[in-house]
Amino acid sequence: MVVTGLAAAMPRYLVIGADGLVGRHIQSALAHGSSVATYRRDPERDGLLLDITDHAATRRIIRDAQPEVIVLAAADAYVERCERDPEGTRRVNVDAARVIAEAASNTGSLLVVFSSEYVFDGTAGAYSEKDERGPINEYGRQKVQLENLAHATGRGLVCRTSGVFGSDPRGRNFVLQLRDALRSGQPFEVPSDQQITPTYAPWLAAAVVSLAAGGHVGTFHVAGPQIMPRVTFARLIAGAYGLPDHLVVPRSSRELGLIATRPRKAGLLVDRINAILALEPIMPEIALRLMAGDEVGTGTTQDRP
């Protein structure tokens, strides 16, 4: 579905949470001067400082910006913390999102939110956008509520994704954590009973910007082209960086002491977005080689879409 009314040129964006992995890459994908960005700490360039649990400040920034598109990239994405502290994480993932959704309705903005394959129970994956939701952990339940809030605005774009990786100054994503451990000769334990759809952050950002610029609303699986066990992805990472994959140690979720139940047969089908966007999917091994190659050439990792 496409909503009319967006300007033909690049719409004005408000990127909430531009210091996170997804938000940072969204901000990088936008034309200079077309967006305002908020940061939880240490604003960059002309960015604004915002804690989204400060509802008054959130409303004020949205009111002042009058954005055509709001990209909500700020979230507490730690699945275990959601399970341990549902009340605390809901303040970020649900309560703050509700305020942003209400403000988006008031300004008539397209609201872009990010969800996960964890809205599914994992008994019948891989999943399409039409499959029934049935979360089995707190993180998934919070994502279901987020999706509902976005849809209730009438101009909500829900982007479900999985296993996002790319350059990150904080080094918090799975690829960089595994790389650093293997470089130091340390074994890295990886869940042996989880599937993901690895998604390259620059590609994700380009796809989201294309969907928003096209005025699309509804739910889209914005993820990589290949579903695989997390252990397989870990070994691809080791290979891309020329590191010993014998240090990748498979462990069951129970052995790892994980509290939150994960969907066993997860994975996102991406037929819908591939049919809509003229954006070539990037295989995980190619994206990893780009990351590793750029790092060797520049001394740092600078991703390319």
Image: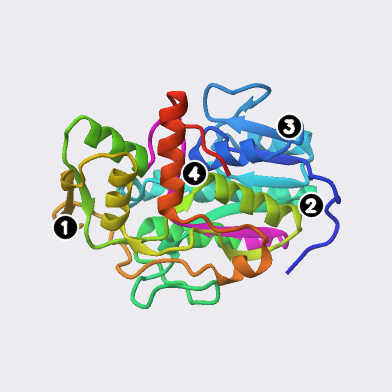
- Above or below, 287 against 224 in this view is above
Left or right of 249 in this view: 227: right
Q: Earlier in the sequence, mark 4 or mark 2?
A: 4
Percent of width and height locating residue 220: 59, 64
Give the residue type at disc 3.
His
| Separation of marks 3 and 4 at Cα, in angstroms | 24 Å
CB under 8 Å between discs 3 and 4: no
- Crowd band around label 2 with a 10 angstrom C-alpha radius: few (<14), some (14–19), many (20+): some
Of badges 2 and 1, nearer the viewer stands 1
CB under 8 Å between discs 3 and 1: no
Percent of width and height locating residue 185: 17, 33
| Separation of marks 2 and 1 at Cα, in angstroms | 46 Å
Magenta highlight on residue 161: yes
SS assignment at label 2: loop
CB under 8 Å between discs 3 and 2: no
* Residue position for label 3: 32
Q: Earlier in the sequence, mark 3 or mark 1?
A: 3
Give the residue type at disc 4.
Ala
Q: Which residues are magenta?
A: 149-173
CB under 8 Å between discs 4 and 2: no
SS assignment at label 4: loop
SS assignment at label 3: loop
Give the residue type at disc 1.
Arg
Can you tell which mark lies on residue 108? Answer: 2
Left or right of 27 in this view: 237: left
* Residue position for label 4: 75
Q: At x 33% / y 76%, what residue is drawn?
A: 123
